[in-house]
Image (cartoon, rainbow, N blue to C red):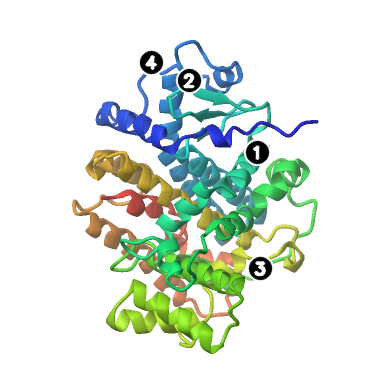
Amino acid sequence: MPPPNLQIGMADRARLQVAFRRVAAQQLQTGAWLGARNWYLRKTKTRTDAGLAHQRERQLADYIAASVLLHAVDSARYLGRSLYCKAINDTHAVRHFAYYAELRAAMSILASEGIGVFNKWHYAVKSDGALARTSNISTHQYAWAALSAWSRDQRAADLIARIAGPIGGRLDTLLQTAFPGMGLGSIAASWFETWGLDLAILADEQTWRNLSSYRPTMLLSEIDRSPTEVVRELVDFWKAFEPSAASRFGALDNQLLRLAFEQQAKAAGVPKRSRRYRHVAQAVASAGWAGHQEAWFFEFLTRTNPATSADLHLISAAREKPQQRREYVSNYSMICRAAILLRIALGSAALLVADSGTPAATLRSWLDNLAIRSAIPAMPVNGSDVVDELWDGIMGAVDVFGQLDPPLPSFADMIARAAEPIILVGQCERIAIWSLTG
C-alpha cells in the first residue's frame, strides 16, 4: 500500500494568517468565531467527509484558522481535567484526558501551519487560498503522521526558534553564536518525537486507548501513587509554568533553551565539563543577556549552580523512555508531554495573532468570556496584571499543598484539607488566557 498523501508540503502558514485576520476582524466583534452561515460550523464531520463543497473552500479555511486558538484552549481544558483526576486518584481518566490534551495541542499546531485535522479527510490551505485534500486516514493516525512529517520540515525548526528563543530574539540565531552553521532541524524533529510519544504509540494502538476510555477500568490492577507523591507532582507541574518578568513561560522556556543548547553541543562533539563547553556556554550567555543575567545563564547552561542544575521534574518526566516506565503509559509523563505540546501550541497561536496583524485587544472579550466559563474570577484590564492575577490564584493553591504535612494518610484526607486548591490546580485555562492576553 502506498504511503498516505499528507499534503504537508502544500500547507501555507502565510495564507492561513490571511484567513485568521479575516475571521478575527469580521466575527470576533460579534462574539463568535465563525458566521452562522459557515457551511462547516455544523455537521462538520459529515461535511468534511463528503469532500470540498463547491465554492466553500474559503469557509473551510476560516474554520481551520478559527480552530488554532480553540484547539489550544481545549487542550488546556483537557490538561486541567487530567490534573484534577490525578488529584482524586482516577488514574485511567488521567490518561484519557492527557492523551486528548496532546491530540488537541497537535491539532492546534498543525492548524496554525494551515493543516486542518478532521475525521477521515484532512485539508491543507495552499498559498493561493485553495485547499488540498489528504488521503483517507483516521483522525488519530493522521494527527501523528502529519505532526511527525511536519516536524522534519524547516517550518518546525523555524517555529521552535521563534518560541523558545530569548525575549526579542530567535533560538537558532542565539545558538549560532557558539555553533556557526548549525540549525535546529534535528532538535525540532527530536522534540516532537519525544513530546508526541503518546500520539505515536496510541495512534495505532486503539486497544490501549480503549483501556482507559471505553473498558471497565478496575478489571486491571494499577500501580498506586501515594497522595504525598501526587501532591508533589501537582506542585512540580505548576512551578514549571511560573511566569517571569520577561516571559509568560519563563521557567519552562529556559529549560527548553538549555535542552537545545545541550543537544547542539553534543551534535558538535563538545564534551560536557570541558573548557570548550564552558567557552560555548559563555558565548551563548553573552549573546543573549547582559550583567547579572549573563552570569546567571552561564551557570544555568553549565549546570554549575546547585539551585538550577537539575531539570524541572516536568522536563525529566516528559523525557521518560517507554522501557523506563513502571506502567504501560505513566500518567504523569503523559501530563508533562501534553503540557509541553500545549506550550508550543499556545506559542504558535500567539505568533499567528501577531503575524496576522490582529490587535491583541480583539481577543479580549473572548478571553473574558473564556474566564467566566472556566470559573475564573474577573480579570484586570491591564494585560500584565492579568498574568499576575491568574498566577497568584495558582500560587495560593500551591502554598496550601505545601502546608500538607507528609505523609498524607489518604486521598480522602487530602481532599478534605485542600478541596478548593484541587479545583484551582485543574484550571489550565489560566495558562491559555495569560498566553494570549495582550
| Local SS, label 1 | helix
Mark toward the start of the polypeptide (1 vs 4): 4
In the picture shown, does residue 123 fall above or below 432?
A: above
Tag 3: amino acid: Arg
Residue topped by disc 1:
140
Residue 3 to residue 136: above or below: below
Between 319 and 354, the one lying in front of the other is 354
Choose the circle earlier in sequence order: 4 or 3. Answer: 4
Q: Which residue is mark 2?
A: 42
Q: Earlier in the sequence, mark 1 or mark 3?
A: 1
Left or right: 67 with respect to 27?
Answer: right
218 on left or right of 182: right
Residue sitting at x 35%, y 73%: 287
Front position in the image: 136 or 203: 136
Label 1 to label 2, Cα distance in Å?
21 Å
Position of the N terminus by quadrant: top right
C-alpha gap between disc 4 and disc 3: 50 Å
Given residues 415 and 307, the one toward you in this image is 307
